Image (tube, rainbow, N blue to C red):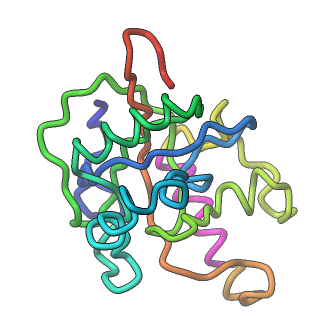
Amino acid sequence: MNTDDLFIGGAYIMINGIIIQRNQIGRYKGVEGDNWYLNDKYPELFEEYFCENIEKSWYDSDYVDVCTDIHFVEKYIELSRLNHIKFRVLLCETEKEKPNIQNVVWNTRFIGYDYAYLGGSYYSAVLNDICSGRIEQFKDYILNSNGLFDNITDLKDFISKREHYKRQYGNQLIEEGDFVIYKLYEIVLDEGDIV
């Protein structure tokens, strides 16, 4: 993993955990998407664990809704494959302290930086303010092939301008919420194959 930017906004980056996401066609490959898509299909297997161990950002602003339980992740992957669902496994780093996954041993590929909610819908300002073309003032930002920022400097510039427009226009134009910077990797599950 690239550790060139161990600090985001003056805070140390934590390797928080994993999001499993249905692989959708489109340029944007950040945290907003069809995440945890099997929870409704297999509530008896996933819902209780998810609510108790992953979905905590609603009441703890130091928590990112990601998974650190490898057995839970493996079961999700197994059932996704059995159901012929194309998916992606994202490894997320943020400045938030919780959770914190230890001993990361997967092959990963850096895909970019996102600016999104801690969980829930994982609403992404990058997707909704830039990729969508919804806000004219952000049309000049250059995103990588994953629809994300390649570097933290450009992302911080976007956040600064976004805060300026939020003060100027309020929530009529700019979504407000508990946003956090995500440094994202895709986990390579099979040799040379990113699912």
Percent of width and height locating residue 80:
49, 36
Q: Is residue 190 left or right of residue 32?
A: left
Percent of width and height locating residue 16:
27, 54
Q: Is residue 44 left or right of residue 7?
A: right
Nearest to the observer: residue 16 or residue 8: 16
- Residue 58 position (above or below residue 93): below
Q: Residue furthest left?
A: 103
Q: Is residue 81 left or right of residue 47?
A: right
Q: Residue furthest top?
A: 191
Nearest to the observer: residue 102 or residue 149: 102
Q: Quadrant of residue 66?
A: bottom left
Residue at x 37% of width, y 70% of height: 55
Residue at x 72% of width, y 48% of height: 141
- Residue 83 position (above or below residue 138): above
Residue at x 30% of width, y 62% of height: 95
Helix, strand or loop for the magenta stretch, by majority: helix
Image: magenta residue range: 152-164
Nearest to the observer: residue 181 or residue 17: 17
Percent of width and height locating residue 102:
13, 45
Q: Quadrant of the N terminus?
A: top left
Q: Is residue 166 left or right of residue 63?
A: right
Q: Quadrant of residue 56?
A: bottom left
- Residue 44 position (above or below residue 61): above
- Residue 117 position (above or below residue 46): below
Q: Is residue 15 magenta?
A: no
Q: Residue furthest front?
A: 44
Residue at x 44% of width, y 43% of height: 184
Percent of width and height locating residue 171:
72, 87
